[in-house]
Amino acid sequence: PDTGSFTISTWVYIRSNGFGDQYLVSKADTVSNYEYAIWYDGSRFNFGVSVSGFGFDGTVQASTPNPVQLNTWYHVVAWRHSDANGGG
């Protein structure tokens, strides 16, 4: 996987909880082999970064602490910082 630093920023307006995970932003080389993703799971925003290069096995993951309120705009920002040695 790409080991560089990056920042992702987007505005999201959630109208309904929907069904299953709703991906806002992702990078993958196959349907399930994600390098990173931001998604809404019907309750919270989640951010995951693969550290193994095999989907979300060995993932660093974070979620919003509180449930998302419907019919509200959210500014969602996620970042990954990599040091000079390629560490995360």
Image (cartoon, helix red, strand yellow):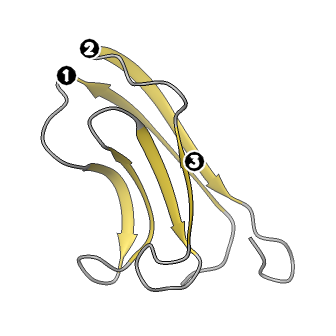
Q: Which mark is residue 86?
A: none
Residue tagged by mark 3?
A: 78
Disc 2 secondary structure class = loop
Which residue is rendered at x = 33% and y = 83% of the image? 29
For disc 3, the neighbor class at 10 Å (few under 14, some 14 to 19, many from 20) is some
Which residue is rendered at x = 36% and y = 76% of the image? 28
> How many labels were placed on the picture?
3
Q: Answer yes or no: do the residues labelled 2 and 1 have beta carbons within 8 Å?
A: yes
Camera-nearest residue between 60 and 88: 60
Residue tagged by mark 1?
A: 15
Disc 3 secondary structure class = strand
Which residue is rendered at x = 78% and y = 77% of the image? 87
For disc 2, the neighbor class at 10 Å (few under 14, some 14 to 19, many from 20) is few
Q: Amino acid at mark 1?
A: Arg
* Side of 81 where 17 appears, left or right: left
Q: Earlier in the sequence, mark 3 or mark 2?
A: 2
